[in-house]
Every structure is written in structure tokens, then in C-alpha cells.
Amino acid sequence: MAAPAAGRVFAFRDARWAPDPVLEPGPAVRTPQPVPLVIDNGSFQTRAGWACPDPAVPAEPLLRFRSLAARSRGARGGAGAETQVGNDLGSPEPLRWLLRSPFDRNVPVQLELQELLLDHVFQRLGVASQGCVDHPIVLTEAVCNPLYSRQMMSELLFECYQVPKVSYGVDSLYSFYHNRRQNWPCSGLVISSGYQCTHILPVLEGRLDAKNCKRINLGGCQAAVYLQRLLQLKYPGHFAAITLSRMEEILHEHSYIAEDYIEELQKWRSPEYYENNMHKMQLPFSNKLLGSTLTSEEKQERRQQQLRRLQELNARRREEKLQLDQERLDRLLYVQELLEDGQMDQFHKALVELNMDSAEELQSYINKLSLAIEQTKQKILQAEVNIEVDVVDSKPETPDLDPLGSEQSLEDVESINEFEPLFAEEQPEVEKPVAAVQPVFNLAEYHQLFLGTERIRAPEIVFQPSLIGEDQAGIAETMQYVLERYPKEQQAVLVQNVFLTGGNAMYPGLKARVQKELLEMRPFQSSFQVHLASSPILDAWYGARDWAVEYMTREEGWITRKDYEEKGGEYLKEHSASNVYVPIRLPKQAPRTTEALAPSRALASSTGNPCEQA
């Protein structure tokens, strides 16, 4: 939970993402052999790091960034399109309409965007191999991942990056693998609730029972959108300030799951309970009221600031004009030198380029331009000596006839004339007593979001999808449906190890809610145990690292390039935290024999001519 400010008012952090640095891998990463690179490819966040038993290498993900990419179109006539990935975006809100994700739900389908994420990972981790990535890859995938998605991912890794071998595993099973204990059984019921989906996974004897897995298409993303709609309807005056990023911050730091939703709503009806548990979120605002009167001192100070800015603007314009006039004078003097040296052909050609007719006209322009330069230099020196000079009434200096600089001089005149009405001398007026404008409401309170039942309504959708109009079952109903597909003996084994993981497991009260639901659905006086992951967000990466370190020198679970070429990109080598591989079996077409064709021919002959039958 975020620490409250004065008066239980919480301010939005609106934290900007810091760009990921380019890390230099240590020698332990490559010697005696390249160690595996573990990538938790989540739909919300990508986490990457090394699986190295050496204590010198950190046993934690070195990169953590949002699985997003934005490609700008680029300015006209300037550089081309610019692509930003993850933390390089800084803040997602200004680029919300440009953000793209490679995931559809939790399955990667846009492989060109997935390639951008992998490029970012390899570049920032310092994988500097020549044309390839020579580290084994451990990559997480969705439960019951479609074969086409795995095929495209394998093709990307083996063909584009030339990886030696790769292993696929389910993130929630890796988390289950990481939190295993000596007294834990190998069987259990894993409830994984993430950003896009919630899964109920039965694990029997250490292996996933894929036939009875169930998925709920609800997660943190839908909760954030639901909370945004609730608050935008409640505060239509702050429609634009209620952004998805701020809704995610509210969900992560101010929301919780009620143990009994209806009973909790009854508590919120009490004014005392509402005042004690309501959170106020402070939106950014300005203390200046529109139409507020300024004192004479404030007006004088503002006028002085405007005068100083205009003085700096005029000084900069003089310097720029002096530089341009000096360049023109140097050019004219160069043409005059051609005449003195007797290079008549080049001299006449230069006169044509300058749109002049004779040497006398050239000398006239040289004299006028020299005079203008001297006047400009004197004005610059005078402005430096006399800082108090009034620059409002000063007129732009232009030579009488300047065919080369007339266009620039007219622009200067128009630019200075635009500023003159703004800084004209004000006529002294008699000061009238003005009553201080008192606001009729608290401006800070007007820019506050009062979070009451919204704190429990948004996370509740994973238990009651009907709140947002979804025709799906919640966690409790789906869990009961999965358990009823097993005999009573296996049900008793599964409920002894109900394991909660995923980003939504960070909600306070989730464990108590699942225990209450199990108590209602299980037989009287039956026992069950609910365990929460030690780190629901990072345990998937930690479990994948544990598996990679343990199976680094084994062949079990690794798909080599030879396997990829022989068995196809959809091939999967199963292990304790992987999906179940179901190969594609195309039905063989039986050859058409003469016996099979005979009845069809007889039928055709019998129905061929309706006139003859008549």
C-alpha cells in the first residue's frame, strides 16, 4: 500500500520509466560454456536474466520492462520512423494510441513485434555474438499454447537468432516448481491470475493435466478498464485525467478483494466505515484561479519580465542580422575582387547571379551594406552599455535599398510589430479597491478522486465476471467445475495444495477469499490448504532459472536445432513445467477402389433420366 499524505490524501506517482542500460555480461556467463538465458515472456511485462550457478552473476532478472512497442511515423522531411520498446517509452500515456503488443490475450501472434522485444533483450543484456545468439533460451509460453504460435516462435529463434537450443515452459508451473517444498506433494491445483487471463491448472504427480485445464478471459487489464469507466462516470469533469496508467496504480496499491463481497458492500453503506476506509487520490492541478486579479506589484513584475524577454529577443535578432549582412558583404567584396583581378567572365557571371547590371551598382550596394553593418554594431554596443534602454519603442533597422536582404528585413519588421501591442505602455490608472476573490469551493478537493466501493468492485470481476457483462464463470465456479471432473480421492489430493500465483495474487484478501470459497464447496469437515507464492510476480522467472540451472547439462526438455529441422517448429520436449505436446495428426485418405465406386455408379444410373423412370 502507498503511504498516505496529510489527511489520508494519496498523490499519483505518475512515475516515468527509466531507459534500460546496456549491461556488460561477466566472464562467468560464457565460460566454460554459454549459460542459458531465461526470458519470462509475459503479456504485461517481460523479464530476462541469466541462469548461472556462479554467485557472481545475479540470481534475479536484470531486465524488467512492459511488453509494448511504439513506432512513430517520423517528421516530414526528417528522420524516418522511430521504434521504442519497453522502458524506452518513458510514459505510455502520450503514446497510448501508438502502443502495440505482440499478444492476443496471452498468446504471441504478432511475431514482428515479438522480434522487437527479443532484440531489446539481447541488446541490453550485451549479447554481442556475431550474427547469432549462442546461448540456450528458456522461454515461457501460455497454457495449451497453439501449435502455430510455438511454430512461429521456434522459427524466429532458430532461423533469425540461430540459438543452439530452446526450452518452453508454462509460467505458472515454473512458479509452482520454484515454491515446491520437501513436505509438499507433487499434486496440486494452481490458480494463476495474470494481466489478460486467469487459469485453473490441475497438476497430478508432477505433470500438468492439460485435458482439465480451464481459462477465464479476465485479468488485470479488464479490471483497469472497468475501474476507468467507473471513475469517468463518477467524475466526468476529470475524464482526460483518469488514465489507464493511473488506474493500474490504484489497482496495485489501493485495491483489495473482499472475503464476502455482499457483506463488504453492506459495510460501505455506513458513513463511519466510508470515512475511515475511503482513499482520496489527488489529481494534479494549479492553484491559480481563472480570472483572479493581480496586484499592481505583480503587474509591474510581469511587465518587467516581458520587457527583458523582448530585449533578449531584439539582441538575438540584431546578432543574427549582423552575421547575415557580414556574409553578404563578404560575397560582394569577393565579386569586386574578380573585377580588380581582370577576371571579366567570372565577374559578369557573378553579376548575373546577383541580379545586378554594372560595377557601379555593385559598389553602391557595398557602401549601403557597410553602413548598415556599422549601425548594427553601434546599436549592439549601446545595448550592452545601457541595460536600462527601452527596447519596446525601438524600430528594426533596415538599409534603404537592399535587394539581397529585403525579404529578411520585412520578416523582422513583421515579427517586431507583432510584439508591440503586447508590450505597449499602459496608461496610469487610479487604483480602485478590489475585493479579494474567495473561491466558493476547495480547489484541491475538486481535483480529488474518492475511492470507496471502487476499491473492491474492480478486482471482484475475476470472481463475478457478470459485473462487466461477461458471460463466463468466475474463479470459484471454475475451480469447482475442475474438481468435479476427478474422483473424490483425487479431489482430496488436489485441494491439499491450492497454489496462488500471478500478478493478481498480490491483491490483499485473495487467499482468504479462496479459502472461503473452498470451505463452501468442499464436504463438511474436509481439509484443504491454500498457499500463496513467495513472489507472485517474479516466481515464474525464478522457477525457470531453477529449472535451467538443474537441467543445464541434460538433454531432457531442450529442443535442439536438429529436432527443429526434423520434427518441425511446433515440436515440444516435455518436462516437469511444460505443456503437453499433442502433435498434428492428419487423417489418411483411403484410396478409392472399384468396389467403392460401383454403388455410386449404380445410383447415378438409376437416377440419371427421370423420363425413362416415368
Image (cartoon, grey):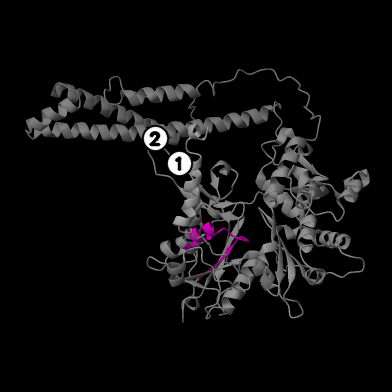
Mark 1, Cα crowd under 10 Å, few <14 / some 14-19 / many 20+, is few
| Location of residue 370 (image quadrant) | top left
Q: Is residue 240 magenta?
A: no
Which one is nearer the viewer's eye here, 306 or 178? Answer: 178
Left or right of residue 103, residue 399 in this image: left
- Image position of 553 (left or right of 246): left
What residue span does the magenta drawing correspond to? 137-154
- In the image shown, does 255 or 364 lie closer to the viewer? 255
User: What residue is shown at x 82% (from left), y 69% (from top)?
Assistant: 488
For numbered disc 2, what is the local secondary structure?
Answer: helix
User: Which residue carries the number 1 mark?
Assistant: 73
Secondary structure beneath label 1: loop
Q: Amino acid at mark 2?
A: Leu
* Above or below for 574 versus 375: below
Q: Residue at 44% across / 35% down in the picture?
A: 385
The residue where tag 2 is placed is 381
Q: Are marks 1 and 2 in contact (CB under 8 Å)?
A: no
- Vertical relation: 391 (above or below) 473: above
Q: Residue at x 59, y 54 (%)?
A: 17
* Residue 119 spot, x, y in % from top left: 47, 59
Q: What is the x, y in percent for residue 576?
A: 63, 73
- What's under tag 1, amino acid-wise? Arg
